[in-house]
Image: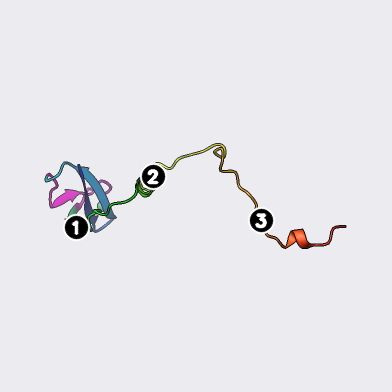
Amino acid sequence: MATYAYRCLECGQFEVRLPIGTAEAVRDCPVCRSPARRFFTVPNLTRLSHAASAALTREEQSREAPEVVTHVPPGRRWQPPSHPAPSRLPRP
Ligand SMILES: [Zn+2]
């Protein structure tokens, strides 16, 4: 599967995942059904670390289906920033 980019003059850009070599030069816009022309983007050929690749995948998925959490995940509790100045203040 490959991701192909199209540009609708009315609605802007959209992407379609299709088997390699099956993308048409013109495709109907999924929103307004007017013809949208395919355009080429820079291929994502860089080798990323596993952590960077996972973060990129998660970011892409969150565009359309963001994760909803009902509580703070364990180990990710917010900690107030520690600054040494308050500890030097005189105590009452
Ligand atoms: Zn459109």
Quarter of image, res 64 = top left
What amino acid is found at the position of numbered circle 2 in the picture?
Answer: Arg
Mark 1 Cβ and ligand 1 under 8 Å apart: no
Image point 14% across, 52% down: which residue? Answer: 26
**Is 32 above or below relative to 83?**
above
Q: Is residue 33 magenta?
A: yes
The residue that disc 1 covers is 40
**Which mark sits nearer the N-terminus, 1 or 2?**
1
Quarter of image, res 40 = bottom left
User: Could you tell me residue 52's position as x and y percent?
Assistant: 37, 49
Q: Is residue 30 magenta?
A: yes
| Residues marked 1 and 3 touching at CB (< 8 Å) | no
Single out the residue that lies furthest toward the right: 92
What amino acid is found at the position of numbered circle 1 in the picture?
Answer: Phe
| Image label count | 3
**Is 22 above or below relative to 45?**
above
Tell me the mark number nearer the camera, choosing from 1 and 2. Answer: 2
The residue that disc 2 covers is 58
Q: Secondary structure at mark 1?
A: loop
User: Could you tell me residue 24's position as x and y percent?
Assistant: 12, 48
Most frequent secondary structure within the magenta stretch = loop
Which residues are drawn in magenta? 22-35
Question: Crowdedness of circle 3 by 10 Å Cα count: few (<14), some, many (20+)?
Answer: few
Question: Crowdedness of circle 1 by 10 Å Cα count: few (<14), some, many (20+)?
Answer: few
Quarter of image, res 9 = bottom left
**Which mark sits nearer the N-terminus, 3 or 2?**
2
Tell me how far mark 1 sits from mark 3, CA to CA.
Answer: 48 Å
Report the side of 57 relative to 88 (left or right): left
